[in-house]
Image: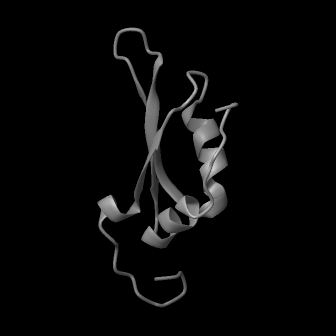
């Protein structure tokens, strides 16, 4: 469903969420968002961190406003962020 269809139905979050693995420890939520927003409007971004050291655990999640944006991002792989 593309924007502008007049349908205000919100798609389930699990259809709009994208797992991002293999992140460099330097990757931040801001740099992740900046990279992935080329495929659509992002409503949430998180880089998972160790609760004690606060270092990245090497993965995160992007949640788009629409499910087709996940497909657009996936169709443009491979992705390279912060050298990885």
* Foreground of the two, 68 or 54: 68
Horizontal relation, residue 5 to residue 76: left or right: left
Q: Residue shown at 68%/31% (left/top)?
A: 82
When the figure is inspected, residue 41 is found, relative to residue 33, above or below; the finding is: below
Q: Residue shown at 48%/72% (left/top)?
A: 68
Q: In this figure, what is the number of numbered marks? A: 0
Horizontal relation, residue 79 to residue 50: left or right: right
When the figure is inspected, residue 84 is found, relative to residue 2, above or below; the finding is: above
Q: Position of residue 79 (x, y in %)?
A: 63, 47
Horizontal relation, residue 75 to residue 17: left or right: right
Instruction: Specify the farthest residue to the right.
Output: 83
Q: Residue shown at 62%/55% (left/top)?
A: 37
When the figure is inspected, residue 63 is found, relative to residue 12, above or below; the finding is: above
* Residue 44 in view (yes/no): yes
When the figure is inspected, residue 66 is found, relative to residue 82, above or below; the finding is: below
Q: Position of residue 56 (x, y in %)?
A: 47, 22
Q: Residue shown at 64%/32% (left/top)?
A: 84
Q: How is the image coloured?
A: one colour
Q: Position of residue 3 (x, y in %)?
A: 53, 81
Instruction: Specify the farthest residue to the front.
Output: 78
Q: Position of residue 10 (x, y in %)?
A: 34, 73
Instruction: Specify the farthest residue to the bottom.
Output: 6
Horizontal relation, residue 8 to residue 84: left or right: left
* Residue 41 in view (yes/no): no
């Amino acid at each position: 469903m593309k924007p502008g269809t007049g349908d205000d139905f919100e798609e389930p979050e699990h259809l709009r969420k994208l797992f991002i693995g293999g992140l460099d420890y330097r990757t931040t939520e801001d740099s992740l968002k900046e990279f992935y927003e080329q495929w659509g409007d992002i409503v949430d971004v998180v880089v998972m961190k160790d609760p004690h050291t606060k270092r990245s655990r090497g993965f995160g999640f992007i949640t788009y406003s629409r499910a087709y944006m996940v497909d657009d991002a996936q169709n443009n792989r491979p992705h390279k962020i912060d050298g990885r």
